[in-house]
Image (spheres, helix red, strand yellow):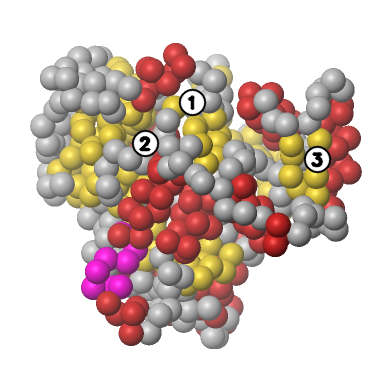
């Protein structure tokens, strides 16, 4: 449990070298949800030792005692004195099938689960990511002038932040410059400044990160904000971890074009913690594939190209993975252009969920109707078209009305643009036939939540 910084990185690698099972987790704070999440991880994993820095050791120690006075878990500060002499360390004979770390899921649609990641899973996924960032022709170029730096701000306890941001530079012969998520949210321009100053070759972020950057830059000229900004060095901008929106990709590319951002550096991808990270990805320099598909046909489960249809962003091709589209009810594989559940096989697929053999069997060891497998059932819906994966939504979120398959994000997107007063809305409610929207508004360094005529303002 560390704040963002290099200490976590060093200690995580130390756990891998020593054969200890690492569990990256955020620092618990006064937020009730964060405290509950941290408590759940401690109890679920049977944690015996909490590693942190000296600045947080006392508070974490007191919290652990209050959490369970009978527990033998203690907190140790790794940046203090009294650590063993590194010269006494001897290499551990490590089996690739051994557990490297436990990655807890975000818990956005269910309770967080501990995903058991082996050394084999991690190495395979890191090499798959490297093949997307550095295809052979790019590697040849870098061998002449080695210069592969990553820039980012993702949380280190999230799978995309840990594997994509922190660990991928090790497998890509590169360097890394990063800041904390809090710093990025408060000062989004810092992200561009890091890319420009350190000549970053690639970066990782979910769609909302690019959207937040776009919103923060909509007023004023980039030259006025920082005359030294230059993004011509950037060759690979991955967007993943949540639905990738074509309008955001296009808007960011237009807004940043004057400082050297090119549309072909976009690299949409698809992945999940249960597959270590990346499942499909776009190769460096290929640019995004954006298709337009008939909305009614999609709701009926078919991808039919239509010039006036809905835009969907392709998430690239399988990256060291076997990707199938399967009918959820029958486990029957579907042909290209048919919407079904995304099943994934390969060496990046985790061993299962910690301490939950039933969920592991239900999600990680399924076979298709014709006997192929085992596969991971992702719970995500999508289709394959010309080798590219398009993700359409979550199976559990699907709303079926009179035989029509409607995705909630489509409703949200339409509602956001239906009226300028609505704005981005995290929730809607129909109360007494009146539609009430909740709006998040950045306002003077604060966040304002507006509900009808009632407002709540936070400076946190």
**How many other residues sit within 10 Å of disc 2, few (<14), some (14-19) or many (≥20)?**
many
* Predominant SS of the magenta segment: helix
Query: Looking at the image, is mark 3 or mark 2 earlier in the sequence?
Result: 3
CA–CA distance in space, label 1 to label 3: 25 Å
Q: Secondary structure at mark 3?
A: strand
Query: Image point 43% across, 37% down: which residue?
Result: 97
Which residue is disc 2 drawn over? 349
Between 162 and 390, the residue placed more toward the observer is 162
Between 338 and 198, the residue placed more toward the observer is 198
Segment colored magenta: 132-139
Q: Position of residue 439 (x, y in %)?
A: 58, 41
Determine if residue 371 is in view. Answer: yes
Which residue is disc 1 drawn over? 353
Assess whether mark 2 and mark 3 are in contact (beta carbons under 8 angstroms). Answer: no
Q: Is residue 213 left or right of residue 125?
A: right
Query: Image point 23% across, 39% down: which residue?
Result: 322
Q: Position of residue 153 (x, y in %)?
A: 57, 59
Between 452 and 136, the residue placed more toward the observer is 136
Vertical order, 134 against 410 (above or below)? below
Vertical order, 397 against 441 (above or below)? above
Which residue is disc 3 drawn over? 75
- Residue 316 magenta-highlighted: no
Q: Position of residue 216 (x, y in %)?
A: 56, 63
**How many other residues sit within 10 Å of disc 1, few (<14), some (14-19) or many (≥20)?**
many
Between 230 and 426, the residue placed more toward the observer is 230
Determine if residue 439 is in view. Answer: no
Q: Position of residue 454 (x, y in %)?
A: 70, 35
């Amino acid at each position: 449990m560390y704040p963002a910084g290099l200490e976590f990185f060093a200690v995580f690698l130390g756990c891998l070298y020593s054969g200890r099972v690492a569990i990256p987790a955020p620092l618990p704070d006064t937020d009730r949800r964060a405290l509950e999440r941290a408590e759940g991880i401690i109890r679920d994993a049977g944690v015996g030792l909490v590693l942190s820095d000296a600045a947080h050791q006392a508070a974490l120690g007191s919290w652990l005692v209050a959490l369970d006075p009978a527990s033998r878990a203690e907190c140790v500060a790794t940046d203090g004195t009294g650590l063993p002499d590194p010269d006494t360390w001897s290499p551990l004979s490590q089996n690739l099938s051994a557990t490297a770390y436990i990655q807890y899921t975000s818990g956005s649609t269910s309770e967080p689960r501990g995903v058991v990641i082996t050394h084999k899973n991690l190495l395979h996924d890191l090499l798959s990511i490297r093949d997307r960032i550095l295809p052979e022709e790019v590697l040849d170029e870098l061998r002449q002038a080695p210069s592969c730096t990553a820039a980012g701000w993702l949380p280190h306890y999230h799978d995309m932040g840990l594997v994509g941001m922190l660990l991928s530079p090790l497998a890509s012969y590169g360097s890394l410059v990063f800041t904390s998520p809090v710093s990025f949210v408060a000062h989004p321009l810092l992200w561009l400044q890091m890319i420009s100053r350190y000549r970053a070759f690639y970066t990782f972020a979910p769609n909302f990160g690019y959207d937040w950057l776009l919103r923060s830059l909509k007023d004023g000229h980039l030259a006025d904000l920082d005359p030294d900004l230059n993004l011509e060095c950037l060759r690979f901008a991955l967007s993943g971890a949540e639905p990738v929106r074509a309008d955001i990709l296009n808007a960011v590319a237009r807004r940043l074009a004057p400082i050297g951002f090119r549309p072909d550096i976009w690299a949409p991808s698809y992945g999940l913690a249960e597959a270590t990270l990346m499942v499909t990805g776009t190769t460096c320099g290929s640019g995004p594939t954006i298709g337009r598909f008939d909305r009614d046909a999609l709701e009926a489960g078919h991808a039919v190209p239509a010039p006036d249809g809905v835009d969907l962003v392709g998430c690239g091709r399988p990256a060291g993975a076997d990707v199938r589209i399967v009918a959820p009810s029958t486990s029957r594989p579907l042909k290209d252009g048919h919407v079904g559940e995304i099943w994934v096989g390969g060496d990046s697929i985790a061993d299962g969920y910690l301490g939950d053999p039933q969920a592991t069997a239900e999600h990680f060891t399924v076979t298709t109707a014709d006997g192929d497998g085992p596969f991971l059932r992702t719970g995500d819906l999508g289709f394959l078209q010309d080798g590219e994966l398009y993700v359409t939504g979550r199976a559990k979120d699907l709303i079926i009305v009179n035989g029509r398959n409607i995705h909630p994000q489509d409703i949200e997107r339409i509602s956001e643009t239906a009226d300028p007063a609505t704005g981005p809305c995290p929730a809607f409610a129909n109360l007494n036939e009146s539609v009430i929207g909740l709006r998040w508004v950045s306002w003077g360094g604060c966040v304002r939540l507006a509900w009808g005529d009632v407002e709540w303002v936070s400076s946190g």
